Image (cartoon, rainbow, N blue to C red):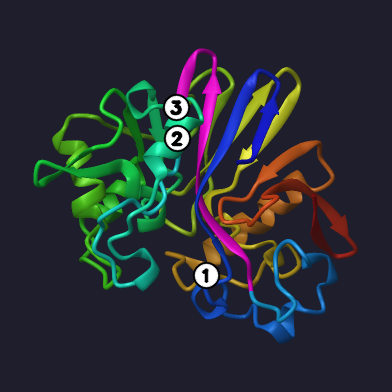
């Protein structure tokens, strides 16, 4: 269980998956072994000896100014999905967040960086033959632009994640549609980073003169710091995603800002530094 402190803000990582099971052709197709093995700094943390990408799916538990926030809610249990490792999972997420001091009833806010199935799954849980909010006392913060898109989108082959993980939150009256730059507390706010989804946001954290950013999927893997032009097949608008990623890298390179990559394998967080004409991730 990784933990960070940014000023007075406490952050805890709760992992659902962390391995090399997500192939490059699904995450970043250009990130083949032949293309990533020459990037020496990716080993040992972010690729294995064979050049397979290491990645993670996790939630962040954030304590800020007396409020409790969950950033992204992973895959969830019991959800029917076409991806075998995602299908009807039976994980210990609830037990793990309780052990971290975050029982689900104590959460004040849930913020999804975007509305994709690996970021909304634990929004709900299967109780009494229906999908019910996992965090019954929380306000769920969804990007208005993402919801406008998802509400009218056809069900994808990945599964009806909107029907089982997003719509029930609206039905329960717990959803708040937000626009950037929405502040959750004085220390934490959501900032627009569109491209991967229409209303994608990253999470900015500033406290006590220290700074951090939770990337969401504007960067899937550290190899994209060397090759920002490598895009995900799941990007809603790949050109916009590239523009956002390049702007993000330029803005935070060589700055004292902790970058927490939402799919980065352990150690997950580090700093972006310039490396000639490109960038590298320093942990």
Quadrant holding the N terminus:
top right
Foreground of the two, 236 or 35:
35
Q: Residue at x 25, y 65 (%)?
A: 159
Mark 3 lies on a secondary structure that is loop
- The mark lying in front, picked from 3 and 1, is 3
Q: Is 65 contained in the magenta span?
A: yes
Q: CA distance from mark 2 to mark 1?
A: 30 Å
Where's residue 70, x and y in %? Answer: 45, 34
In the image, taking residue 144 as reference, residue 71 lies left or right, namely right
**Where's residue 48, x and y in %?**
71, 73
**Image coordinates for residue 78, horizontal then vertical, percent:** 25, 55
Q: Nearer the viewer, residue 267 or 263?
A: 267
- In the picture of the structure, the residue carrying the numbered disc 3 is 102
Identify the residue position indicated by label 2 in the image: 97
Closer to the camera: disc 2 or disc 1?
2
Let me know if residue 231 is in the magenta part.
no
- Magenta segment boundaries in residue numbering: 53-69
Q: Residue at x 60, y 58 (%)?
A: 219
Give the alpha-carbon distance from disc 2 to disc 3, as whole Å.
5 Å
Q: Earlier in the sequence, mark 2 or mark 3?
A: 2
Q: Is residue 203 above or below residue 250?
A: above
Q: Separation of disc 3 and disc 1 at Cα? A: 33 Å
Task: Give the labeled residue for mark 1.
Answer: 232
């Amino acid at each position: 269980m990784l933990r960070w402190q940014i000023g007075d803000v406490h952050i805890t990582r709760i992992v659902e998956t962390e391995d090399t099971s997500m192939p490059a052709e699904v995450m970043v197709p250009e990130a083949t072994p032949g293309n990533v093995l020459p990037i020496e700094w990716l080993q040992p943390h972010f690729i294995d000896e064979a050049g397979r990408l290491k990645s993670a799916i996790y939630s962040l538990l954030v304590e800020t100014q007396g409020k409790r926030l969950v950033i992204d809610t992973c895959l969830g249990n019991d959800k029917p999905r076409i991806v075998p490792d995602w299908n009807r999972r039976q994980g210990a997420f609830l037990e793990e967040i309780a052990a971290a001091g975050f029982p689900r009833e104590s959460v004040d806010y849930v913020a999804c960086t975007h509305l994709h199935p690996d970021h909304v799954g634990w929004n709900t849980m299967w109780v009494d033959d229906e999908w019910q909010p996992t965090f019954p006392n929380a306000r769920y913060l969804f990007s208005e632009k993402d919801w406008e898109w998802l509400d009218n989108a056809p069900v994808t082959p990945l599964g009806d994640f909107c029907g089982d993980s997003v719509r029930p939150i609206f039905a329960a009256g717990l959803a708040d549609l937000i626009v950037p730059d929405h502040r959750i507390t004085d220390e934490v706010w959501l900032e627009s980073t569109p491209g991967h989804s229409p209303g994608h946001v990253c999470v900015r954290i500033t406290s006590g003169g220290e700074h951090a950013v939770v990337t969401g999927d504007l960067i899937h893997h550290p190899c994209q710091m060397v090759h920002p032009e490598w895009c995900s097949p799941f990007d809603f608008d790949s050109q916009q995603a590239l523009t956002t990623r390049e702007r993000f890298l330029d803005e935070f390179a060589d700055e004292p800002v902790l970058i927490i990559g939402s799919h980065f394998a352990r150690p997950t967080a580090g700093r972006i530094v310039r490396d000639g004409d490109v960038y590298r991730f320093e942990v």
